[in-house]
Amino acid sequence: MLAVAVCMVLLAGLQAQDLQGHVSIILLGATGDLAKKYLWQGLFQLYLDEVGKGYSFSFHGAALTSTKQGQEFVAKVLQSLSCPEDVAPERCAELRGRFQQLSQYRRLRTSEDYMALSKDIEAQLQHEGLQEAGRIFYFSVPPFAYADIARSINSSCRPGPGAWLRVVLEKPFGHDRLSAQQLATELRSFFQEEEMYRVDHYLGKQAVAQILPFRDQNRKALDGLWNRHHVERVEIIMKETVDAEGRTGFYEEYGVIRDVLQNHLTEVLTLVAMELPYNVSSSEAVLRHKLQAFQALRGLHKGSAVLGQYQAYSGQVRREQQKPDSFHSLTPTFAGILVHMDNLRWEGVPFILMSGKALDERVGYVRILFRNQAYCAQTETRWVADQSQCLPRQIVFYIGHGELGSPAVLVSRNLFRPFLPSGSWKEVEDRPGLRLFGRPLSDFYAYSPVREQDAYSVLISHIFHGRKDSFITTENLLASWAFWTPLLDSLAHEAPRLYPGGAENGHLLDFEFTGTQLRFSRQQPEQLVPGPGSAPSPSDFQVLQSKYRDSLLISAWPEELIAKLADDIEATAMRAVRRFGEFHLALSGGSSPVPLFQQLATQHYGFPWAHTHLWLVDERCVPLRDPESNFQGLQVHLLQHVRVPYYNVHPMPVHLHQRLCAEEDQGAQMYASEISALVTNSSFDLVLLGMGTDGHTASLFPQSPAGLEGPQPVVLTRSPSKPHQRMSLSLPLINRARKVAILVMGRMKREITLLVSRVGHQPKKWPISGVLPSSGQLVWYMDYEAFLG
């Protein structure tokens, strides 16, 4: 009797172990391209991995497609599902047949439809005597549909008590920080954070998924190397040969930065740069450390990026989006970004992120290149891969495609022999003649997966097992958008460099960096007239010289225009120093001259800074350290990078006696006296101005008489926008300059540029029209967006 009782207890225990519960998986958008290519196969792979392990399944394909059409579509897709190579054909056919029996299609549109689905699931559980473990809803639908679907699930289709709910969301997760925040707030009203799984399929790619385990399993070897003292740079690259044809509607809204860099490549960056948790198996610890990595990212600026667009793109947009023949898109299809981290581990190490369409090859990789301070006395032909310290030292997580053709982890033999789990990774056999990053494959310890898996199959398995570290939390999502949105805003009106596409790109997209500045290595060939053809494209013009308001006009694309203006300023400075021994330069503030300041700081090493006096054309009435201060902008983008004697820097005295621009402090008179004492005849060698969309220049505004005429060289004025109080050089003082340069950039300036070209001398209405040096030269510098629209 005792033996029987023991057997009964053991049998009951085994049955309890076998019956862990039923999981219902609902694929929304089941008839879409993503579902057809990846998701149904991923769900089948989950079934293959989990069958017989204690869970029962049902798979519900759902969409807006009619029931009959949807059933036919799903049946066709299910028939094409495949098994891994190690599954025998007969066994595969058997398992596929079972999966087909467990899968069905239904139309889901209304809350009533979701309620009916929930009742059907409950009826199945009751009929088969199953306990519900949980439900997975995979949103393979556009984000605009999220809210309605989420509302229906929350109100009508949640699982019962004790069962979990997991909702899977596909990108895009917003267009910028504000839209991402709005979407996150909306979803939070229906789901808890732990219920949401935001998919970035790059995190399911085997080489990417191996980054943290590799760092963990090789801690001893990497602890002394994984830092600024040893890492020269990190490259995170995704190149594509295909273009955007057929997807220009999406691409016009998002572009390459939002499509690839803000999500895929940034997620990879955090895996490389984050501090390694003690326990990498802890999702909570991994996500916390990733957030810390986001928070250490240094802010980006225009100079952090180079942009390109393949030449056929605008034509594709015109055809697909019914745009007029004159339309030229500013959407980048190529971007290189220079990123830095502000922490002790990575300070000063450049992280290069690059992606683009219509490039010369399809490949993705993460490359950590280590510093090399060795010199080898023997000739290179005698260098041995695992002994010579003169060979490049690098670790590469090869994401796929390219020359190698498959995922891999590569470690230079002169670094260390890495550990990778033999059950899932195997050594790659040498392939004579194959070279990667300039070295033969034999220079590396190379490992590839024992069994290649699709990224979606990996992620669907992680969703099922509740592994949150492979997904994007709300907090990390908003941190990423907070990092990228300012750069995206600053680049919104920038014209990308055009490139032909494919192998014909040559070296046109090569770029280089100095400090925090990124720029293309080669200038595009100069062409002063439109190229042949009926309709000139943006690339047909480079640097044009003409007339505008009877003064010299120089027009070009932004990059070439800034380079030209910087060259002209340096030439003017050299002439002034040779003739007078010093150069007096008055600079305007705002965002337009920032690229110029960066150009002067990083590309003009022969500039006579030691003999240059820097003055301000105007200033906001805020403390000089305030981010809105023109002087602070000058300090950040120029002064801290060049050697100007401190006594040659002349900020406007807007903050005296702990007051801002008080008339009784006589700050304007003080600045005028300083100019009179140091600048011969109060005639600056060069004054740099801008032009506002209302026709103002410096801080001289329409319908405001201050500074437009009269004897006062420096005046207090009032701006229509905050901060309202300003200090400015007067129009008569500006017109005493030997040279005045007016920089006008961006499509937003096109209307005022056209208007000012037609008006006469009306400074009270259009202050810019009053700029006309009495005995000096006036030159307009306009980019094509401002000049041609």
Image (cartoon, rainbow, N blue to C red):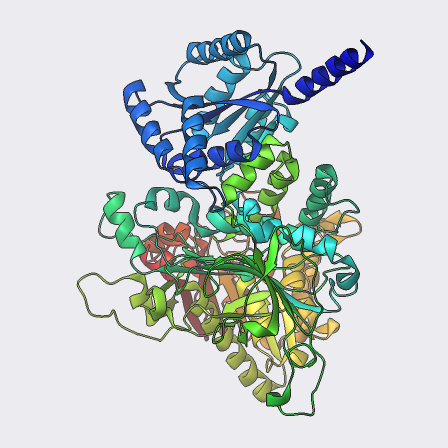
Which is nearer the eye, 286 or 316?
286
Q: Residue furthest right?
A: 2
- Residue 598 placement, left or right of 667: left
On the picture, is 609 further left or further right than 688?
right
Front residue of 107 and 547: 107
Counting labels gives: 0
Residue 442 placement (x, y as % from top left): 57, 74
In the image, 341 versus 389, the foreground residue is 389
Can residue 352 be seen by looking at this rendering?
no
Which residue does the image show at 43% across and 34% down from the upper left? 40
x and y percent of residue 377 in the render?
69, 92
Horizontal and vertical percent position of residue 326: 24, 53
Against 516, residue 123 (above or below) is above
The x, y position of residue 688, in whole percent, is 52, 66
Residue 370 higher or lower than 124, as above or below:
below
Q: Is residue 298 above or below residue 599?
A: above
Snapshot quadrant of residue 547: bottom left
* Residue 560 visible in rendering: yes
Query: Residue placed at 46% from the left, 64% from the top?
Result: 742
